[in-house]
Image: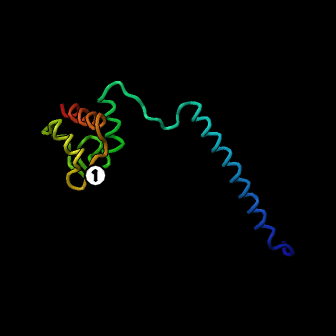
């Protein structure tokens, strides 16, 4: 090794490039399999609006309002003192630091129905 000081670096570089190529092909293959299986992050369809509301709540609201509606950085929603109209107004207007319009239309109504169902 004394006569060839670059040899270890060259071997490491070749192995690294080879590993990158192999992992790229593995990733492409996994993406193709996901597409074939229908697991390509398409929106799920729900028959029950409360299930849709729960899914939307989990993806858009849980970080601020908590997994059990107990509140975190946002206010608690578990008191049962909110009407559907109050919830829809809050979703569309975004009171305080809440961004307005995170969900709209039927999705907002589904979230409101989920919150009301959880408070029954």
Q: Determine the residue positioned at 76% across, 60% down.
A: 14
Pinpoint residue 57: horizontal percent, then vertical percent.
Answer: 31, 40
Q: In percent of the image, x 84 and y 75: which residue is there? A: 2
Q: Position of residue 45 (x, y in %)?
A: 40, 29
Say above or below: 8 vs 104: below
Q: Which residue is mark 1?
A: 99
Observer-nearest of 12 and 61:
61
Residue drawn at point x = 35 percent, y = 24 percent: 47
Residue 36 at x, y percent in the picture: 59, 31
Q: 40 left or right of 22?
A: left
Please determine whether, in this image, residue 115 is positioned above or below residue 75: above
Q: Position of residue 82 (x, y in %)?
A: 15, 39
> In the picture, residue 1 is in which quadrant?
bottom right
In the orientation shown, which residue stands out farthest toward the left?
81
Lateral position of residue 71 relative to residue 46, left or right: left
Look at the image and tell me in which quarter the C terminus lies: top left
Residue 34's quadrant in the figure? Answer: top right
Binning the other alpha carbons within 10 Å of mark 1 as few (below 14), some (14 to 19) or many (20 upward) gives few
Towards the viewer: 17 or 109 = 109
């Amino acid at each position: 090794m004394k006569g060839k000081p670059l040899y270890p670096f060259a071997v490491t570089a070749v192995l690294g490039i080879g590993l990158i190529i192999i992992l790229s092909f593995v990733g492409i293959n996994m993406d193709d399999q996901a597409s074939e299986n229908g697991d390509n992050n398409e929106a799920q369809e729900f028959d029950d609006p409360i299930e849709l509301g729960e899914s939307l709540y989990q993806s858009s609201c849980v970080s601020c309002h908590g997994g059990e509606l107990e509140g975190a950085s946002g206010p608690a929603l578990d008191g049962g003192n909110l009407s559907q109209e109050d919830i829809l107004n809050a979703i569309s207007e975004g009171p305080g630091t809440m961004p307005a319009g995170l969900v709209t239309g039927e999705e907002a109504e589904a979230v409101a129905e989920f919150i009301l169902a959880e408070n029954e």
